[in-house]
Amino acid sequence: MARAYSKDLRERAVEYVSKGGNRDDSCKIFRLAKTTLQRWITLSKKTGGDLSPMPMGSRPWKLNHDAVVEYAVINSDATLHEIAEHFSTGKSAIDYILRKYKITRKKNHAVRRARRRKAGSI
């Protein structure tokens, strides 16, 4: 993953422009893209001069993985659709979590399971 520019570099580049320097010259001197410098200038105006880089990293999970796995183990006949409905999310999110923990799912729908149970009891 790429690293953020240092706060010192950000401040020097914005300060150069604020003291009357040309933006193109600032980009050449500090080896920046024009859009990067423009974002920093806008950020400086919004925050009153604070150019600290935003924290980098992944977003926190919206779903509790342990809860999904526990529900899938307890309700072993539940389909992806049923589990997704229980957690009010999409099937792909549930599928991703279950694959991560190497839990396989049945592909049969609840109606088909009910028919099989009924046919097996005859």
Image (tube, helix red, strand yellow):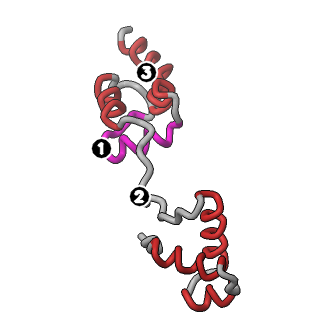
Which residue is drawn at the image coordinates 45% and 39% (left, top)? 62
Spatial CA distance of label 3 from label 2 is: 43 Å
Left or right for 115, reference 105: right
Q: Give how far across and how far down residue 112 sits, in percent.
A: 48, 22
In the image, residue 107 above or below residue 116? below
Left or right for 54, reference 104: right
Q: Give how far across and how far down residue 79 sits, in percent.
A: 44, 29
Q: Earlier in the sequence, mark 2 or mark 1?
A: 2
Q: Give residue 114's quadrant in the image.
A: top left
Left or right for 9, reference 21: left
Q: Nearer the viewer, residue 28 or 94?
A: 28
The residue identified by callout 3 is: 113
Q: Nearer the viewer, residue 99 or 106?
A: 99
- Magenta-drawn segment: 90-106
Spatial CA distance of label 2 from label 1 is: 22 Å
Task: Name the residue type under label 2.
Answer: Gly
Q: Nearest to the eye among marks 2 and 1: give it.
A: 2
Q: Give residue 97's quadrant in the image.
A: top left
The residue identified by callout 1 is: 101
- Is 105 magenta? The answer is yes
Which residue is drawn at the image coordinates 39% and 33% (left, top)? 106
Farthest-out residue, front: 19
The N terminus - image quarter: bottom left
